[in-house]
Image: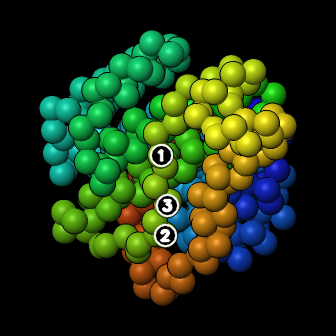
Amino acid sequence: MATDIDLVALCEQFPCSPEAKALAAQHAKASEFIAALRQEKLSVDAVQAMARSLPKEKAVEWAAQSARTAGEQAGLTPEEQETLEAVDQWVARPDQARKTVVSTVAAELPTDSPVSCVANATAFSDGIALPEGAEVPTSGDDLTGHFVASAVLLAATKISSQNAPELPATPESPEIPDVPEAPDIAELPEAIGLMPEEASMPVDELVATAESSLDEGQDLMESQAPPEIPAKEQAQSDKLLKPFLDAGMKLAETVPGFV
């Protein structure tokens, strides 16, 4: 799996620095690309790339490890601890029942909690439900990677607040609405309460409209320029993120073909 990743296309999924894009074009394997990013002290880009190049279960496991690492210094609430235990169960055996448990126990977590991002990464591991036959928008397929990266960066930020250098801010992601289970495509007009004239629209046109709205979040992310990080802050973030990236690479070594 890891050997088939288009690294240049991967860089289009997050606010990627020009230097990182140039490195992506020079490497064929994700492990080599991430190593090159780290060599150039592009650690935030390395986190983003690793979050999207690991298999989703491994990426979520990395995010959970990162949240626990932060919790060792900043502390974990009982709800966060319960959520991480539920995530462990899902990682060990990914299925819908365990995913539902994760979503249930994480429902009241604050959005700035790394554990909340871990739960969201788990919840969106199968993408967004769409009518049968509809093409999955890019934003829908990238949500796990986005939330894994957010969990790792937030975890590092939690540690930075405990007398460590502050991690440079990263662009905010668009709010993701709750996505109900998709109705049967034949019942789509009635299910979403369309007006009579809308109900007569071809199904393909309705699906295209739905996909367009889901892609708005991705368009917003792509329109955000990557933050310019001063050299001093870049060195600080490199130091701060090193243990998280080391842990991610250790997990990556268990993925056939990644290294």
Of the pair 110 and 162, the residue shown nearer to us: 110
Label 3 neighbour load within 10 Å: few <14, some 14-19, many 20+: some
Can residue 202 be seen here? The reply is yes
109 left or right of 5 in image: left
Q: Position of residue 95 (x, y in %)?
A: 52, 14
Q: Of circles 2 and 1, which is in front?
A: 1
Label 2 neighbour load within 10 Å: few <14, some 14-19, many 20+: few
Circle 2 is placed at which residue position?
171
Circle 3 is placed at which residue position?
173
Q: What residue type is labelled 3?
A: Ser
The answer to whether the residues at label 3 and label 2 have Cβ atoms under 8 Å apart is yes
User: How far apart are labels 3 and 2 at the CA level?
Assistant: 6 Å
Residue drawn at the location 30% of the way across and 73% of the way down: 165
Q: Which amino acid does label 2 sit on?
A: Pro
The answer to whether the residues at label 3 and label 1 have Cβ atoms under 8 Å apart is no
Determine whether the residue tagged by mark 2 lies in a helix, strand or loop: loop
Q: Position of residue 161 (x, y in %)?
A: 22, 65
25 left or right of 218 in image: right
Residue drawn at the location 30% of the way across and 33% of the way down: 106
Circle 1 is placed at which residue position?
177
Task: Note whether 112 is above or below 21 in the view shown.
Answer: above
The answer to whether the residues at label 2 and label 1 have Cβ atoms under 8 Å apart is no
Q: Residue 203 carries which label?
A: none
Q: Which badge, 2 or 1, comes first in the chain's sequence?
A: 2
Determine whether the residue tagged by mark 1 lies in a helix, strand or loop: loop
Determine whether the residue tagged by mark 3 lies in a helix, strand or loop: loop
Residue drawn at the location 84% of the way across and 64% of the way down: 26
Residue drawn at the location 75% of the way across and 21% of the way down: 186
Instruction: Pick the quarter of the image with the N terminus.
Output: top right
15 left or right of 44 in image: right
